[in-house]
Amino acid sequence: MNNDRQLSELERHLLNDYQHGFPLSPTPYADMAEQLGVSEQQVLDSLDRLQREGLVSRVGAVFRPNRVGASTLAAMSVAEEELESVAEIINSYPHVNHNYEREHEFNLWFVATAGSEAELCSVLGEMEERTSHTILALPLLEDFHIDLGFDLQWT
């Protein structure tokens, strides 16, 4: 992304206003458009542009772990020189909703979700095959809620 790029007013609203309260309806983008006074196509185009530019990694619902489908926290131990390429492979899966680096022997962490436990195992196995690295799967035993919505400030 070009760091000099100024976000439009619509982009600012899309990034800030829907971290919580995403419309739960058959037409969420039309609902957002109506709330923001723009067309549904403008909302879709803006979200697409924000994703292509890397400002948004994913737009979608987040469900409480293991209430719908299956999920796990996963970790990999990856040599520093491979970290970026392995992270790129992991991020290519729609099953991954975030991926981050930690200072630890297991230095690449992500959360993977799937429609079922069998699908999740299959996806993790495919990731291991593609990256040639073993994945440590850490399924949820006790859940804690951390609100990761942040009120964005524009300067």
Image (tube, rainbow, N blue to C red):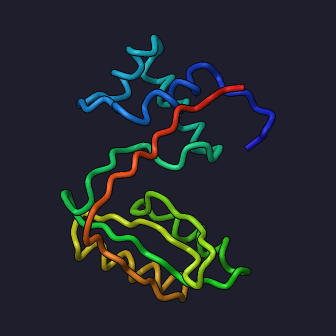
At 39% from the left and 22% from the top, the residue drawn is 32
Q: Is residue 81 left or right of residue 76?
A: right
As drawn, 10 above or below 152: above
Image x and y of residue 130, in percent: 51, 82
The part of the image, by quadrant, that contains residue 65 is bottom left
As drawn, 6 above or below 39: below
Image x and y of residue 21, in percent: 34, 31
As drawn, 20 above or below 104: above
Relative depth, front residue between 143 and 73: 143
Image quadrant holding the C terminus, namely: top right
Q: Is residue 93 left or right of residue 8?
A: left
| View extreme (right): residue | 4
Q: Is residue 80 left or right of residue 106?
A: right
| View extreme (top): residue | 37
Q: How many marks?
A: 0
At 60% from the left and 37% from the top, the residue drawn is 49
As drawn, 55 above or below 104: above
Image x and y of residue 136, in percent: 42, 83
Image quadrant holding the N terminus, namely: top right
At 40% from the left and 45% from the top, the residue drawn is 147
Relative depth, front residue between 36 and 105: 105
At 42% from the left and 59% from the top, the residue drawn is 94
Relative depth, front residue between 63 and 153: 153
Image x and y of residue 72, in percent: 34, 70
| View extreme (left): residue | 67
